[in-house]
Image (cartoon, helix red, strand yellow):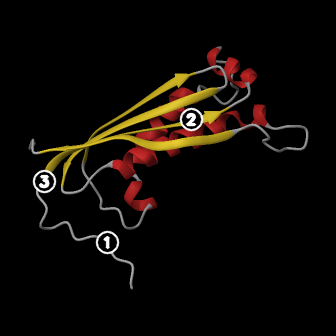
């Protein structure tokens, strides 16, 4: 069996929407630095927002079997908890195939960028990350309707 992209040529164009979510677990002290806008590299939430949008747009480059889609809307939101940042993405397109991979890629990219910006605060004395973790990345909603552009 060979690897191949799915043929969607016979499918109708429909409005496609997907929402994905994920978290990065951080030290409470790191979260407080984010709240106080005291992170040396800049605001990780702003970076996550922009990086998530870019990640959604880059999905077919990163996942070779994904179709390149014309995304109509990418929305990234962040929620700051006691020891975590939760990122949610919503992606909308009028296409022949779904946008859940774009929503997942947006979340993963946003979370990775948060980690990159705060990693100096998360390391222990050995340069390791004993408590930092990206978790629970998942699709929470996938909808397609016959609505056309």
**Quadrant of image for the C terminus:** top left
Q: Residue at x 53, y 30 (%)?
A: 86
Q: Is residue 116 above or below residue 33?
A: below
- Measuring from the top left, give residue 128's x and y in whole percent: 82, 44
Mark closer to the chain start, 2 or 3? 3
Q: Position of residue 114 (x, y in %)?
A: 60, 35
Looking at the rendering, which quadrant does residue 53 occupy? top left
Label 3: few (<14), some (14–19) or many (≥20) C-alpha neighbours in 10 Å: some
Q: Is residue 112 left or right of residue 133?
A: left
Of residues 130 and 57, the one nearer the viewer is 130
Q: Which mark is residue 13?
A: 3
Please give the name of the residue rendered at 38% of the width and 83% of the height, measured from the top-left corner. 2
What's the distance in space between the residues labelled 2 and 1, CA to CA? 30 Å
Q: Position of residue 82 (x, y in %)?
A: 65, 19
Quarter-wise, where is residue 119 in the image? top right
Q: Residue 80, relative to residue 98: is it above or below? A: above
Which mark, residue 23?
2
Q: Is residue 44 above or below residue 16?
A: above
Residue ID at (12%, 67%): 10
């Amino acid at each position: 069996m060979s690897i191949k992209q799915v043929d969607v040529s016979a499918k109708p164009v429909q409005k496609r929407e997907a929402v994905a979510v994920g978290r990065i677990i951080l030290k409470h002290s790191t979260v407080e630095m984010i709240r106080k806008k005291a992170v040396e590299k800049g605001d990780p939430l702003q970076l996550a927002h922009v990086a998530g949008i870019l990640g959604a747009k880059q999905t077919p480059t990163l996942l070779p079997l994904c179709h390149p889609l014309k995304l109509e809307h990418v929305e990234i939101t962040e929620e700051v908890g006691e020891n975590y940042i939760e990122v949610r993405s919503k992606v909308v397109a009028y296409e022949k195939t779904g946008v859940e991979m774009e929503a997942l890629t947006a979340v993963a990219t946003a979370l990775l960028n948060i980690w990159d910006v705060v990693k100096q605060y998360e390391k222990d004395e050995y340069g390791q990350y004993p408590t930092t973790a990206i978790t629970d990345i998942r699709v929470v909603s996938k909808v397609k309707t016959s609505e056309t552009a």
